[in-house]
């Protein structure tokens, strides 16, 4: 449950600080690339808690060859026969990469457990193995950061309602999202149990109050930057060459190619 609601953050203040933090994220990216570091950021939380919007702001100005988002679909029949963590291992970063998990292996502790998509034995096995799995990642040198986006029941309800009324965002809603309203307490208990078992010293959970999306985005990004001991990498020196003189090339006539119609001419 989120805490007391703060005064709305002015848009200008938000946009100015967001740009500053995004500039620092680019520096972090370059440090990761230059040093061969491996950074994993896990985004978890309730439906409509603001994970997707935050991931968008984190990745907005980053190089997709260095920083990528892993948002895995439902497991295939073959994946269901694997060790549970196996398909997530395939998406871990190599040297010089950042991976942002839009939901992660914690699906088993949340939606799979609450909705009955896994057995109790599979759920208990996950709670035992997850800390071991994450300790192995950290011991191997991976920088692992885990963020839980906390949203109140009333704010979640309002966001669902706005999505239902917005044709551009209605796709974000699924029947399972709406069912989470009726299972609020079940999800709360599942989150509490998950925290007890997986909030470990090597990979602690960081809770982001997200009733105010602007504040939550800035708070999460600032914390991530503060938690990684990056330095500003020396930028590569690039020189813009002089354009060589023409050798007689001429573009073909326009009527030999099909151009996109000028939609803007009628605006």
Image (cartoon, rainbow, N blue to C red):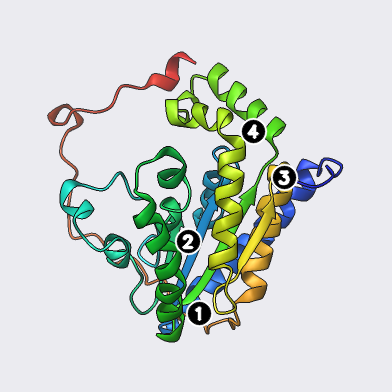
Asked if the residue at tag 3 contacts the one at tag 4, i.e. Cβ–Cβ closer than 8 Å, the answer is: no
Judged from this view, the residue extending furthest toward the left is 256
* Residue at x 21% of width, y 60% of height: 82
Question: What distance separates the C-alpha of mark 2 from that of mark 4?
Answer: 29 Å
* Residue at x 69% of width, y 46% of height: 210
The front one of 141 and 74 is 74
Q: Which residue is mark 3?
A: 1
On screen, residue 74 above or below 65: above
Asked if the residue at tag 2 contacts the one at tag 1, i.e. Cβ–Cβ closer than 8 Å, the answer is: no
* Residue at x 49% of width, y 19% of height: 167
Would you call the spot at circle 2 few (<14 residues within 10 Å), some (14-19), or many (20 or more)?
Answer: many
On screen, residue 111 above or below 58: above
Q: Quadrant of residue 137?
A: bottom left
Q: Label 2: state its secondary structure.
A: loop
Give residue 62's mark.
2
On screen, residue 78 above or below 259: below
Give residue 31's mark.
1
Q: Position of residue 35 (x, y in %)?
A: 44, 85
Q: Quadrant of residue 244?
A: bottom left
Q: Nearer the viewer, mark 1 or mark 4?
A: 4
Would you call the spot at circle 3 few (<14 residues within 10 Å), some (14-19), or many (20 or more)?
Answer: few
Q: Nearer the viewer, mark 2 or mark 4?
A: 4
Q: Nearer the viewer, mark 2 or mark 3?
A: 3
Question: What distance separates the C-alpha of mark 2 from that of mark 3?
Answer: 32 Å
Question: What distance separates the C-alpha of mark 4 from that of mark 3?
Answer: 11 Å
Q: Nearer the viewer, mark 1 or mark 3?
A: 3
Q: Which residue is mark 4?
A: 156
Q: Position of residue 85 (x, y in %)?
A: 32, 64
């Amino acid at each position: 449950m989120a805490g007391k609601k703060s005064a709305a953050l002015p848009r200008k203040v938000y946009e100015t600080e967001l740009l500053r933090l995004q500039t620092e994220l680019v520096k972090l990216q370059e440090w990761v690339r230059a040093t061969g570091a491996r950074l994993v950021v896990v985004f978890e939380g309730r439906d409509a808690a603001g994970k997707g919007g935050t991931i968008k702001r984190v990745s907005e100005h980053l190089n997709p060859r260095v920083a990528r988002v892993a948002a895995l679909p439902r497991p295939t029949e073959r994946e269901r026969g694997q060790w549970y963590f196996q398909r997530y291992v395939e998406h871990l970063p190599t040297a010089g990469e950042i991976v942002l998990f839009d939901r992660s292996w914690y699906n088993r502790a949340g939606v799979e457990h609450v909705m009955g998509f896994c057995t109790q034995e599979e759920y208990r096995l996950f709670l035992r193995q997850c800390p071991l799995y994450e300790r192995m990642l950290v011991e191997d040198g991976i920088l692992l950061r885990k963020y839980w986006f906390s949203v109140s029941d009333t704010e979640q309800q309002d966001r669902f309602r706005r999505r239902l009324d917005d044709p551009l965002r209605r796709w974000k809603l699924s029947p399972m999202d709406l069912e989470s309203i009726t299972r609020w307490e079940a999800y709360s208990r599942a989150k509490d149990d998950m925290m007890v078992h997986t909030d470990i010293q090597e990979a602690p959970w960081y809770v982001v109050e997200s009733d105010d999306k602007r504040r939550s985005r800035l708070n999460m990004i600032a914390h991530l930057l503060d938690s990684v001991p990056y330095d500003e990498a020396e930028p590569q020196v690039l020189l813009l060459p002089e354009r060589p003189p023409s050798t007689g090339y001429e573009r073909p006539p326009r009527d030999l190619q099909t151009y996109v119609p000028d939609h803007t001419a009628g605006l």
